[in-house]
Image: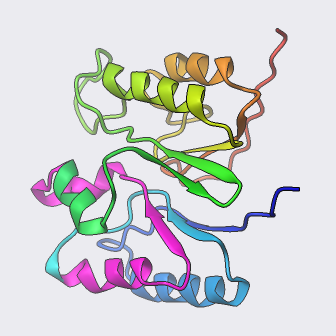
Amino acid sequence: VRKKVTLALISDLHLDIIHDGRERLDAFLKESKKHNPDALIQLGDFAIPTAENLSSIKAFNQSDSRSFHVLGNHDMDGGYSREEVAQAYGMPGLFYAVDVDSIRLIVLDGNDPDSPKNKGGYASYIGPLQQQWLISELEKSDRPVLIISHQPIAGIYTLDNALEIQEILSRFSSKILLAINGHAHVDQHVVAVSYT
C-alpha cells in the first residue's frame, strides 16, 4: 500500500514585481504548515536572487517540509545565469529527479538555449541533453512520476518543442501521474488521450 503524498505548490510569485509578494509567500508558508505536506514546490518565476530576496528564498527553503524549486524564465532577470539562480535556491541542478515518499518528482528546466524556433525573448525549450536525461530517468523509475516544469508542456504558452516532449512522455504514460507547470498565469487542465 502506497502512502498518500501531499504537496504544497506555489507558482509565479514574481517577488520582484508583485507589491505584496512577501506577504503572499508568508501566507502560503503559514497555510502549508497547517497541512504538513510532504514537500513544498515552487513552480518558477519565484525571485531573482538579489540580496533583498535571499530572506524569502531562505524562508521557503527552511519550511517544515522538504522544498523544491523549478527555474522560471524571470528568475534570471537582472543578468543572473541559470547556474547562479539554482545555486542561490539550493537546487541540486538545473533539472533533477528526487523521490518524495512513494512518488518520483522529475523537475525540468524549460530555459535551455538554442531553440530552433526562438525568435528572441525568453528561452522556452528543453534541449537534446536534457531530453536524453529525461528518457533515462523515466526508463529507470520504479515509482509513479510527477513531471514538473515552469513552461507548459501542453495547453497555452507551451515550450517551443512541446510536441517533442509530449512524444517522450507518451512513451512512458503508464508511469506518469501528472505533469504540472506554472508560467501561464491561468488555470488549465489538459487531458491527453492515448489510443495505443
Residue 135 horizontal side relative to residue 110, left or right: right
- Residue 76 sits inside the magenta stretch: yes
Q: Nearer the viewer, residue 133 or 125?
A: 133
Spot occupied by residue 162 in the image (x, y as percentages of width and height): 51, 24
Residue 84 horizontal side relative to residue 93, left or right: left
In the rendered view, would you say 195 is above or below 48?
Answer: above
Q: In the rendered image, which quarter is residue 8 located in?
A: bottom right
In the rendered view, would you say 90 is above or below 104?
Answer: below
Residue 8 horizontal side relative to residue 102, left or right: left
Q: In the rendered image, which quarter is residue 6 located in?
A: bottom right
Spot occupied by residue 120 in the image (x, y as percentages of width and height): 22, 29
Residue 150 horizontal side relative to residue 45, left or right: right
Q: Residue at x 19, y 51 (%)?
A: 83
Residue extending farthest right: 1
Q: Residue at x 37, y 29 (%)?
A: 130
Q: Nearer the viewer, residue 127 or 74?
A: 127
Image quarter in which the N terminus is found: bottom right
Image quarter in which the C terminus is found: top right
Q: In the rendered image, which quarter is residue 170 located in?
A: top right
Q: Nearer the viewer, residue 140 or 73?
A: 140
Q: State the colouring used for the structure image.
A: rainbow
Spot occupied by residue 58 in the image (x, y as percentages of width and height): 33, 82
Q: Which span of residues is magenta-colored?
A: 52-81
- Residue 155 sits inside the magenta stretch: no
Residue 48 can be seen, yes or no = no
Q: Residue at x 32, y 17 (%)?
A: 117
